[in-house]
Image: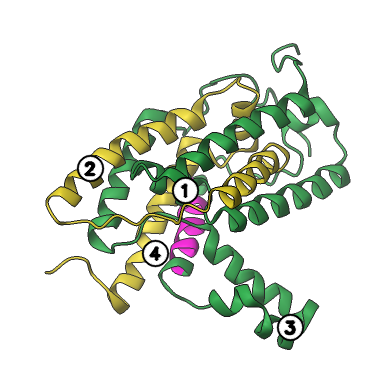
Amino acid sequence: MTLPITGETARWLAIPFGMLFGVLLHRGGVADYNVIVNQFRLRDFTVLKIMLTAIIVGGVGVWALHGMGHAEYQIKPANLLGVALGAALFGAGMVVYG
Amino acid sequence: MKQNGPHPDSGADNKVAGRWNPYVVGTALGVLSWVVFAVVNTPLGISTPISSAASLCATPVMGSGAVAGNAYWTKFPFKWDYHMLFLVGTFLGSLLSVLASRSFRLETVPITWVERFGKSRGKRLIAAFLGGSIIIFGARMAGGCTSGHGISGSLQLALSSWVFLLTLFAFGVATAFLLFGNRSARSR
């Protein structure tokens, strides 16, 4: 089997990958209004614990995979003004929506 | 909505039944990132298909001509591609997870909201609609969300993603301070 898988097979893999993602987000508690809002109130650090752990574990692994030629980096364009404005709205919206 | 007994979600870092350790969940998300990078060459992300699917809701409101002529939806039209199916999978996975944990209940007004803004459902629904709109608008403007930028971008040390994450938290904390002040969640 050669990686990455593309086309129709890859498309259907999205369902199990998405399901794992959904289970992890729910079981982690980050699908909960209270957990999200209390993170921004600095009363519950679940969101940061999950995100920073995912970034560190994911980062080391993807970097290693890249080094072995098994992964390509997928970097979003550094349109920094748009990113910063969008992120500011996103953060404010998260406090309201949860 | 009526609460039965003490709510499990109030207060800080409470243990909630069926919830997994955040470091275990974070590690598993990191490993899932390895898998999707290596197997399908597509980082975890979720906001683009939501915006594409919005064109379906917009068609009866704006008319199909306006949707077809929209620059964003021309670039990202609704289609059952990998990203859309990933979104469907995420919904199904979280639904199965909540059913399996036997904690499923329909809740309109969460406890943290009630403590600050009261029990009005109308008020909560309007705020949720506006908050949700701002979130997805911000995600489009930034080109990603807490998954695409926050996890997938940051783990590659992408500059834009770290700008996204730090700005999001700075404005989130500031907004929370403005909306909630220093009220104690544990003062009940």
Of circles 4 and 2, which is in front?
2
> Farthest bottom residue?
B65
Q: Distance between the Cα atoms at labels 4 and 2?
A: 23 Å
Q: Distance between the Cα atoms at labels 1 and 2?
A: 17 Å
Along the viewing direction, whichever of B66 and A54 lies nearer the viewer:
B66
Q: Distance between the Cα atoms at labels 3 and 2?
A: 44 Å
Q: According to the image, label 4 marks what residue?
A: A15
Which amino acid does the dot numbered 1 rest on? His
Q: Are marks 1 and 2 in contact (CB under 8 Å)?
A: no
Quadrant of the image occupied by residue B13: top right
Q: According to the image, label 2 marks what residue?
A: A61
Residue A52, x across and y down, in percent: 40, 32
Residue B48 image label? none
For disc 3, the chain is B
- Disc 2 packing (10 Å; few <14; some 14–19; many ≥20): many
Q: Are marks 3 and 4 in contact (CB under 8 Å)?
A: no
- Disc 3 packing (10 Å; few <14; some 14–19; many ≥20): some
